[in-house]
Amino acid sequence: MRVGKNGGGRGVPGFCADVAFLFQMLALSRRHLVSPSLSMTSCRRCYRGDSPNDSQKDMIEIPLPPWQERTDESIETKRARLLYESRKRGMLENCILLSLFAKEHLQHMTEKQLNLYDRLINEPSNDWDIYYWATEAKPAPEIFENEVMALLRDFAKNKNKEQRLRAPDLEYLFEKPH
């Protein structure tokens, strides 16, 4: 908030400017309200904090720069970056799910699969979307329906009934391959 010469507040010259500024910001944010009729499977790059049962009447989207594939990194660098990004998510559920998935699958993925996984975990701006797609609570957009999504969905089913309460320790990175 901007402050007037005398510190702002009621009866102080800067207060009117502060109020005007707040109304301008509110007006700007209202222009970006999303219509409830918009499809949730669209892939716009915006941050939004919705849930599957949310009416979305009060949802505000903040535009983000478009995702771009990194073509200038080696496969080893890509694997290391994806491992890190799988562990450091915006929500604990995905930290656990994606880090365990990365531990099991990342080292065996082809370059094409690594690129698909990179897009999957970095293009959507909301981690809840990734979680809902992986657990099949919501359908994934067509662009993410691929072999990596199938692997992630299968992994999320936890057919072996493993206890998945935390991200794996990193010691496995230093073990010799069998």
Image: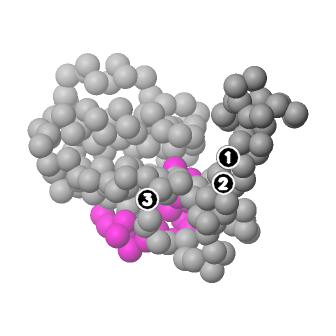
Q: What's the amino acid at mark 2? A: Gln
Residue at 69% in and 66% down? 56
Residue 161 placement, left or right of 58: left
Query: What secondary structure is marked by label 1?
Result: helix
Label 1 vs 3, first from the N-terminus: 1
Distance, label 1 to label 3, CA atoms, is 27 Å
| Marks 2, 3: nearer the viewer | 2
Label 3 sits on what residue type?
Answer: Arg
Q: Are marks 1 and 2 in contact (CB under 8 Å)?
A: yes
Magenta part of the protein: which range? 127-147
| Number of other residues with Cα within 10 Å of mark 1, as a class: few under 14, some 14 to 19, many 20 or more | some
Horizontal relation, residue 174 to residue 97: left or right: left
Local secondary structure at mark 2: helix
Q: Which quadrant of the figure has residue 144?
A: bottom left
- Asked if residue 169 lies in the magenta stretch, the reply is no
User: Which numbered marker is on residue 24?
Assistant: 2
The residue pinned by badge 1 equals: 21
Distance Cα–Cα, label 1 vs label 2 = 5 Å
* Disc 3, SS: loop
Task: Specify the farthest residue to the right.
Answer: 11
Among the 4 quarters of the image, the one containing residue 152: bottom left
| Mark 3 residue crowding within 10 angstroms, few (<14) / some (14–19) / many (20+) | some
